[in-house]
Amino acid sequence: MGSIKILILILGFGFIYTNTYAKKNDSWSDISQDSIQMRSPVDFIDSYGRYTVIGVNKKIKLVDFGDIEKNKKGYNYTLKNYGVQILNGSNIYNVFKTTTTLNSSVDFNLLYHDKKVVVFRVRDNSTVDYIKNPFKSFLVNTYIYNLNLNKFSTIPVLNSESDLTGKQLDLLQGDQLIFNSKKGTYTYLANIKYAKSGKLGVYKVELNDSLKCIAASQGCDNIGISSAEIETVNK
């Protein structure tokens, strides 16, 4: 009987030890998920903290950086600070950080990737409700990131506002990225439904192999090249 009690105690302590010192799963290192995504990356992400795999030691994640308290003319309000991070080799880079309202819906869409570049689009559909006259906002940006150079181009696709009904918002109806291997150019195409005219238009941007804009429907003045900022170094 005494031997049985001792055995139970040993097993019990073993259970406690195992659970107490269990390794916490790294959000960048879900091995089971990685093996699936290497064959077929996740194209659409609509929640913070999720990532998609685009290659060996190359992953992208929609990140919630926390809330920011603001004060304007004595009025306090809170904004959500979010962005996109890329695990590129041993380093993690912030491609961008920005803010939105707490009453918002943000999603990420992977449009294209190869060994050299990854192209993704971010939509921010929000209600700006911390001001006297609230309104709806629809913001769309597309990013073309060069994995070798750690540089990216930002294509501002849409920045539309409307009253709370949202009937006057311009909307994205679909987009894609096409790579022309012969010319070495990237062409971004977006179908946009314009609220005022009710018509569907095509927004087109063409970039060269260095991600420099060479032609755009609304000109290249607002399409520049930036470097992603390093966040941390994995040891």
Image (cartoon, rainbow, N blue to C red):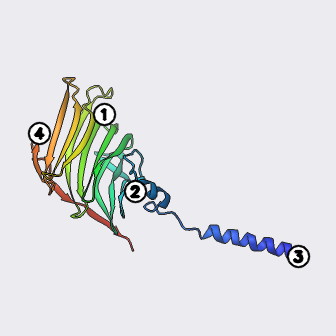
Say if 230 sits above or below 175 in the image. below
Which of disc 2 and disc 4 is earlier in sequence?
2
Task: Find the distance from the CA under tag 2 to the CA under tag 1.
Answer: 37 Å
Q: Which residue is mark 4?
A: 218
Question: Which residue is located at x 39 percent, y 49 percent?
Answer: 42
Which of disc 3 and disc 1 is earlier in sequence?
3
Task: Decide: few, some or many residues near mark 3? Use Cα within 10 Å; few <14, some 14-19, many ≥20.
Answer: few
Q: Are marks 4 and 3 in contact (CB under 8 Å)?
A: no
Say if 36 sits above or below 215 in the image. below
- Mark 4 vs mark 2: in front: 2
Q: Are marks 2 and 1 in contact (CB under 8 Å)?
A: no
Task: Find the distance from the CA under tag 1 to the CA under tag 3.
Answer: 72 Å
Q: Is residue 75 visible?
A: no
Task: Find the distance from the CA under tag 4 to the CA under tag 2.
Answer: 36 Å
- Residue 202 position, x and y percent, is 18, 34
Task: Find the distance from the CA under tag 4 to the CA under tag 1.
Answer: 24 Å
